[in-house]
Image (spheres, rainbow, N blue to C red):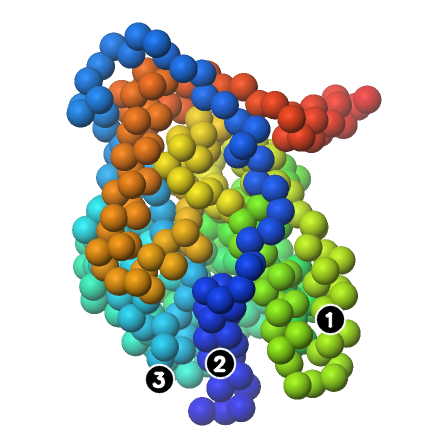
């Protein structure tokens, strides 16, 4: 194992540890400003509510999606195994964390491949950074998918994290071209994914134009990679890394709130995965009503997974029950009905959306 590969792997474990031990949630997702309109006379049975959905040709039992989290270090294998088992049990989708470590060192592949071993029929999404795509081309994309027998590939955008990370990739040139070339030549659906700073309507249009089949909004208001990298810099023994702490603090509020990003992206087309700050089944219902097809959660499922299968399964069951009740109380018997459910938006989120609308209208 080269020093670079060893460092990539240890960084994966650092990220996991920091997420579990430190306060890494930051920002304002906007879901508290979204209110579903109550239907006092729902014309269906709560027990008959159907949360099933089709996404990229796959039938899933719920819009809940286990969002990209981990892999790439031996210590992450068991977490991925449990999350995959949950995906298989509940019939939901699962996206693995960045596969860079295993692409650099095949000895780490089983920290990802365990996912398909544990969930042979689940909808699974591979994960590759756009900089690695640009530098290594379609070969790495094909290896990432093959490694876990994935059904789709997420190409993640994480330039805020890279700008703060001591060893980050700071050159974004050529990435859009690399994405376009992949989408033109690849035989699997490509999902363009942000990692916590959100995607605007303009960026969404670039992604659709490049050939993306879905967009994962990755909005601001959930796990903050600026905060995570700031903690890593604080813990570092390298004096030069300490300079990045102030940069992390300065850019902690950088990004597009999740609800705003979801509204922006949904206005440009679909399918859309909403991630960033969803923390319960009611948030999932709100996101679907705003235009999401899938609703990704990472940190809220990571912590239960570390406590074992029972707690993880109970957490997912709770979120599913909350979603079902929200559907019942909006008169939605199916996800398609929830997509047209009435809602209203208040507070800061409304102000931001109104400001964007004024800009689009030329005021």
- Give left or right: position of 319 versus 173: left
Image coordinates of residue 312 in percent, x first then y, are 28, 54
- Give left or right: position of 324 versus 229: left
* Badge 1 element: helix
Q: Looking at the picture, does residue 22 appear above or below residue 201?
A: below
Q: CA distance from mark 3 to mark 2?
A: 14 Å
Image coordinates of residue 130 in percent, x first then y, are 56, 62
Circle nearer the N terminus (1, 3): 3
Q: Which residue is mark 3?
A: 107
Q: Which residue is mark 1?
A: 244
Please give the label number shown on residue 10.
Answer: 2
Q: Which quadrant, please, contains the N terminus?
A: bottom left
* Residue 323 image-quadrant placement: top left
Q: Residues within 10 Å of mark 2 (few under 14, many from 20)?
A: some
Q: Residue furthest right?
A: 363
Q: Looking at the picture, does residue 3 appear above or below residue 190?
A: below
Circle nearer the N terminus (2, 1): 2
């Amino acid at each position: 194992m080269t020093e670079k590969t060893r460092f990539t792997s240890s960084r994966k474990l650092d990220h996991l540890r920091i997420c579990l031990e430190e306060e890494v949630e930051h920002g304002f997702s906007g879901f508290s400003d979204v209110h579903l309109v109550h239907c006092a006379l729902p014309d269906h049975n709560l027990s008959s509510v159907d949360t099933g959905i089709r996404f990229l040709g796959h039938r899933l039992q719920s819009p809940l999606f286990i969002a990209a989290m981990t892999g790439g270090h031996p210590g992450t294998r068991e977490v991925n195994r449990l999350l995959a088992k949950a995906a298989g049990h509940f019939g939901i989708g699962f996206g693995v964390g960045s596969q860079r470590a295993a692409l650099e060192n095949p000895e780490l592949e089983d920290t990802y491949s365990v996912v398909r071993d544990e969930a042979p029929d689940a909808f699974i999404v591979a994960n590759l950074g756009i900089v690695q795509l640009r530098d290594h081309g379609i070969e790495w994309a094909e290896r990432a998918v093959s490694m876990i027998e994935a059904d789709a590939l997420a190409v993640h955008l994480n330039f805020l994290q890279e700008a703060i990370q001591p060893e980050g990739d700071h050159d974004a040139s050529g990435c859009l071209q690399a994405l376009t070339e992949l989408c033109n030549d690849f035989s699997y659906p490509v999902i363009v994914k942000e990692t916590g700073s959100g995607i605007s309507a303009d960026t969404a249009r670039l992604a659709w134009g490049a050939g993306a089949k879905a967009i994962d909004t990755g909005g601001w208001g959930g796990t903050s990679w600026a905060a995570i990298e700031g903690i890593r810099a604080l813990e570092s023994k390298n004096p030069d890394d300490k300079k990045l702490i102030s940069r992390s603090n300065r850019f902690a509020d950088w990004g597009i709130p999740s609800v705003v990003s979801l509204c922006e992206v949904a206005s440009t087309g679909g399918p859309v995965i909403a991630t960033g700050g969803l923390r319960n089944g009611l948030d999932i219902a709100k996101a679907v009503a705003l235009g999401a097809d899938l609703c990704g959660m990472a940190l809220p499922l990571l912590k239960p997974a570390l406590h074992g299968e029972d707690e993880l399964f109970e957490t997912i069951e709770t979120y599913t029950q909350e979603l079902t009740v929200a559907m019942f109380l909006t008169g939605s018997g199916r996800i398609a009905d929830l997509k047209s459910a009435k809602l209203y938006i208040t507070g800061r989120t409304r102000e931001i959306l109104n400001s964007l609308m004024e800009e689009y209208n030329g005021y």
